[in-house]
């Protein structure tokens, strides 16, 4: 699918677009607060924090994109996932801007997770419709 079609807002429902964005922002804030709590509690025992942040943001954004796609049912799941991921990327960038490359990597995981969540939701709906 072309990037211009994914980023085109024609045919999308604004309520679901806002839901995807708010869902990704809320998920990112919640996940970062959970990781912050673990760091405050266990400190030096926590290793591999960069991988944990990237994987957690990816899976959370994937879940949000999938859920919004399943709720919307309008074949615009990729658009909802990508725009939700971009909103998550913005918040992640603001929270981790001092980390340099890690900030960019974690932010990209939000976009990739949203894209994959939208794709999975669309595929799931197609297989469900065939049956």
Image (cartoon, helix red, strand yellow):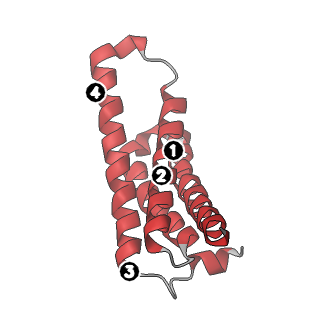
Task: List the residue tagged with mark 2.
Answer: 63
Task: List the residue tagged with mark 1.
Answer: 59
Q: Residues within 10 Å of mark 1 (few under 14, many from 20)?
A: some
Q: Secondary structure at mark 2?
A: helix
In the rendered image, residue 10, in percent from the top left (x then y), is placed at 52, 88
Distance from disc 3 to disc 1, alpha carbons, whole Å, reads 24 Å
Q: Residues within 10 Å of mark 4 (few under 14, many from 20)?
A: few
101 or 20: nearer the viewer: 20
Whether residue 42 is situated above or below residue 99 in the rendered picture: above
Distance from disc 4 to disc 1, alpha carbons, whole Å, reads 19 Å
Q: Which residue is at the far right?
A: 1
Q: Secondary structure at mark 4?
A: helix
State the residue at coordinates (27%, 17%). Answer: 41
Circles 1, 2 touching at the beta carbon (< 8 Å) = yes
Whether residue 95 is situated above or below residue 75 in the rendered picture: above
Task: Specify which label sits upstream in the sequence, 4 or 3.
Answer: 3
91 or 16: nearer the viewer: 16
The C terminus - image quarter: bottom right
In the rendered image, residue 30, in percent from the top left (x then y), is placed at 31, 43
In the figure, is residue 128 to the left or right of 99?
right
Task: List the residue tagged with mark 4.
Answer: 37
In the figure, is residue 91 to the left or right of 105?
left
Task: List the residue tagged with mark 3.
Answer: 14
Task: Specify which label sits upstream in the sequence, 4 or 1.
Answer: 4
Residue 124 position by quadrant: bottom right
């Amino acid at each position: 699918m072309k990037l211009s079609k994914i980023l085109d807002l024609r045919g999308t429902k604004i309520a679901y677009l806002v839901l995807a964005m708010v869902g990704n922002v809320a998920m990112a804030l919640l996940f970062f607060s959970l990781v912050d709590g673990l760091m405050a509690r266990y400190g030096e025992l926590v290793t591999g924090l960069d991988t944990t942040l990237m994987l957690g943001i990816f899976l959370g954004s994937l879940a949000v994109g999938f859920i919004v796609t399943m709720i919307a049912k309008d074949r615009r799941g990729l658009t909802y996932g990508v725009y939700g991921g971009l909103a998550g990327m913005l918040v992640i960038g603001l929270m981790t801007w001092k980390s340099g490359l890690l900030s960019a990597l974690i932010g990209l995981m939000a976009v990739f997770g949203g894209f994959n969540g939208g794709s999975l939701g669309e595929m799931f709906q197609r297989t469900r419709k065939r049956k």
